[in-house]
Amino acid sequence: MYRFIEECKSRLGFDNVSEERRGREQQREPGQRSQSGQRGSGVTHFQRLLTRLQSFLRRDAVRSAPFWILPFALVGLFVYGAIIWNILLSLTDFAGLGEPDYSALDLENYIIAFTGGTPSWSSLSIEPIWNATQNTIALMIGFAVVCLILGLVLAILVDQKIRFENTIRTIYLLPMSLSFVVTAKFWLYMYNPQTGLINITLQAFGIGPIRIVQNPQLKLAAVAFALVWQFSGYAMIVYLAALRGIPSSHFEAARVDGASTFQMYRRVIIPQLRTATVSALVVITVFALKAFDFLFSMYSGYQPGPSADILATRMVREAYANQNWAYGSTIAVVLFIMALFIVGPYLYSQYRRGDL
């Protein structure tokens, strides 16, 4: 296109005509100049349009369009299009049979989700999602807080220039490379009342055996502990990278001022880890919202019991086991809103700082 415009300009003689016109305009009288300007206004306007089109085609976004337009369209269709379709589906009474009726959209599913009761599309009473929401928030907060604290402690210890630092970092980061399914099966064996390492250790101190996975009071804590084991290495790497980015002069200045090691980290170093904390917190909490496959693998289904039931397992159970597809979409929208409340402020802060 750019070459085509250049060829049009050369064939029409715009480059030469403009210089010749300036010379003739200077030699003509004022009256003749105005008449000539009126006759050439059409050509000048066309030349201006070609120049604007040429500058538009020179933009980086336009020139790189063949590389990003197809991925952009695919993401828009299969990600954002699916989100919009799911929101519309949550406003219907679709039960998995036939086609959804989009002519009568209402908020009944959301009312049932938070208040419970018998909806118009079912003869059975449905419990609200408050129990699953509370478990989700408890898992998210407990898992994130413990994971960040443990990751920070490990990062500070590894940052002391210890021997075999690379090996230790690899060992702590290795669990994150495992899938939720592998982690769930591994900790299901570890929690085994007869052969699990946890109960064998407790029995050595005269405690147990304890049926950890089957105990309603310990189910959610057992899930959070396993997730901390898997993601504490990620938090350690994030904090370690942030610690290595702090100038050594800050450490030296704190020591010169007489601060102890604890005071130095508490008052000087840790306040500078705010960005790393926020970044790790967003990733960890989002993984907590996506813990469905972990619970599904550990309890061999999407019914872990009321004490460990989270929104993700409730969503899949309503959609696939109870055939309440619209109601399952409603719970998915609630999960999506929770994720937005986590990711949205982070993205906005990054935008304000100019990092996006």
Image (tube, grey):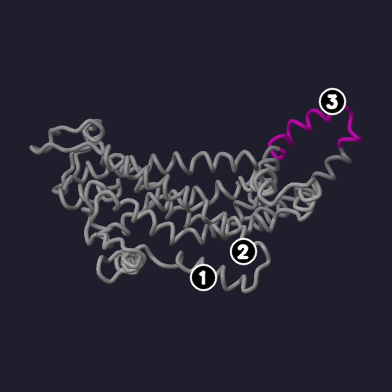
Callout count:
3
Q: Is residue 228 left or right of residue 266?
A: left
- Distance between the alpha carbons at the discs numbered 1 and 3: 87 Å
Q: Secondary structure at mark 3?
A: helix
Q: Is residue 322 left or right of residue 328?
A: left
Eye-nearest disc, 2 or 3? 2
Eye-nearest disc, 1 or 3? 1
- Looking at the picture, tell me which residue is in the foreground, 167 or 176: 167
Quarter-of-image position of residue 107: top left
Q: Is residue 220 magenta?
A: no
- Residue 222 in view of the camera: yes
- Looking at the picture, tell me which residue is in the foreground, 172 or 5: 172
The residue positioned 86% from the left and 35% from the top of the image is: 25
- Residue 54 in view of the camera: no
Residue 288 position, x and y percent, is 39, 51
Can you identify the residue that label 3 sits on? 31
Query: Bounds of the magenta span?
Result: 25-44
Badge 3 crowding class, 10 Å Cα cut-off, few under 14, some 14 to 19, many 20 or more, is few
- Looking at the picture, tell me which residue is in the foreground, 254 or 352: 254
Q: Earlier in the sequence, mark 1 or mark 3?
A: 3
Q: Earlier in the sequence, mark 2 or mark 3?
A: 3
Residue 7 position, x and y percent, is 69, 56
Query: Which disc, if any, is residue 158?
Result: 2
Badge 2 crowding class, 10 Å Cα cut-off, few under 14, some 14 to 19, many 20 or more, is some
Residue with the most extreme top position: 31
Query: Which disc, if any, is residue 171?
Result: 1
Q: Secondary structure at mark 1?
A: helix
Q: Secondary structure at mark 2?
A: helix
Residue 171 position, x and y percent, is 51, 70
Badge 1 crowding class, 10 Å Cα cut-off, few under 14, some 14 to 19, many 20 or more, is few
